[in-house]
Image (cartoon, rainbow, N blue to C red):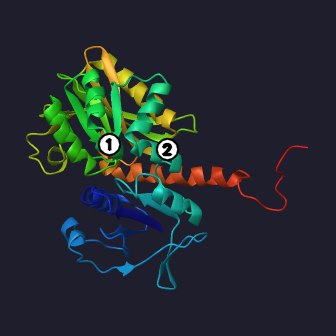
Amino acid sequence: MIAVFFGGRSCEHDISIITGLQAMSACKKKCVGVYIDSEGVWWAAECFDSVSAVRNNRFDGKRVHLRPADCYLYHKNKKLYKVDVALLCMHGILGEDGSLQGLLEMCGIPYTGSGVCASAIGMNKIRSKEIFKSTGLNILPYVTATHAKYTADAEEIIKEVSELGFPVIVKPCNLGSSIGISVAENKAALQKALTVAFEWDDLVIIEKAISDFTEVNCAVLGDSYEEDVIVSETEQPVGWKTFLTFADKYAGDVKSLRHKIPADIGAEKNELIQGLAERTFRAVGCSGVARIDFMVKGDDIYVNEINTIPGSLAAPLFTGMPFSLLIEKLIEIAVRRKQRFDALKRTYTPTTPIIAK
């Protein structure tokens, strides 16, 4: 049985419902949906009729939970479903950040997407940028601020940002989907932007903003520990200016937000971005599918961020690959990774050699 996990307690809850229902509809294997509601309660059902039905709790589901060292979903004290693979469609904290991945590893359940470490890095914009920079990838200059530091000495933060140079873009460190993001053109706007960002996270990143750039996205499917991966076409969102807001991405008029595949930046740059996407994927240590977002200005290409569980699992970027085949490949990758993990002597038994003699 494939267990499709979606929902969750993050502010990206509703987006995750869409991805989860899309995946359940496309999956050709027998699957059960595991919907995590906004309170963190788990519900299992083999059929969810629509996004609105899920949002309004109109489904025939049973409350379930997992137990460490056990691959079953339990309802009360009864085994309800044996989970062969968990198909993760969770976005945001407590789903995309390594939390759920760690629980599934304790239960011995293979799961799609990146492992605990790569998931945590991908969710944290600051840590991921440190990885990008250490491997020679091009990033925009930035400064960071904690809520405690800003409360204690706001002027020092403002001074650091002023030295960076306006305009800047202010982002919560551990969120996605453009939530809590603002552009600040001056000190007054910066203070407002920081107030908004700190409502969502105790840690924020303030990046140098650039204008007249092209956003280009590219996805990678595979495993960093394997030789071959599949790199998608490039994608260029068009019809927006400074950055894509949450409404642009998920509630806007489709006529005002279009996508060009491949991106309209020339064959040479598209090929270069595809290579950089694979390089970024491997630098973070990703598995499954991840989407990497770039900014292109002239001859400069900047890595912006990586999404280890992208919306719709980045299926639209893999042109010519049916969604069902993408899911099949994700499941195969998850199983291979679990088999590789199980083959290593990582757990202690009395017969395990600890050191070479």
Task: Tell me what residue is drawn at x 47 percent, y 22 percent.
Answer: 136
Q: Type of residue at label 1? A: Ala
Structural crowding at the residue carrying mark 1, measured as other residues with C-alpha within 10 Å and reported as few (<14), some (14–19) or many (≥20): few
Is residue 243 visible from the viewing direction of this image? no
In the image, 84 versus 58, the foreground residue is 58
18 to 271, vertically: above or below: below
Check the picture and name the quadrant holding the C terminus: top right
On the rendered structure, is 297 left or right of 115? left
**Amino acid type of disc 2?**
Ala
Visible in this render: residue 148? yes
The one of 43 and 202 positioned closer to us in this rendering: 202
The location of residue 119, given as percent across then percent down, is 46, 47
Residue 29 in the image: state x and y as whole percent.
43, 63
Mark in front: 1 vs 2: 1
Q: Where does label 1 land, which residue?
A: 152
Residue, disc 2: 118
Name of the residue lying farthest toward the right: 357
Mark 2 neighbour class, 10 Å CA radius: few under 14, some 14 to 19, many 20 or more:
many
Using the image, tell me which numbered label, if any, was put on residue 73: none
Residue drawn at 29 percent across, 30 percent down: 207
Mark 1 to mark 2: distance in Å? 33 Å
Q: Is residue 138 left or right of residue 257?
A: right
Q: Position of residue 338 (x, y in %)?
A: 60, 54
- Ranked by sequence position, the earlier of labels 1 and 2 is 2
Residue at (42% x, 42% y) in the render:
122
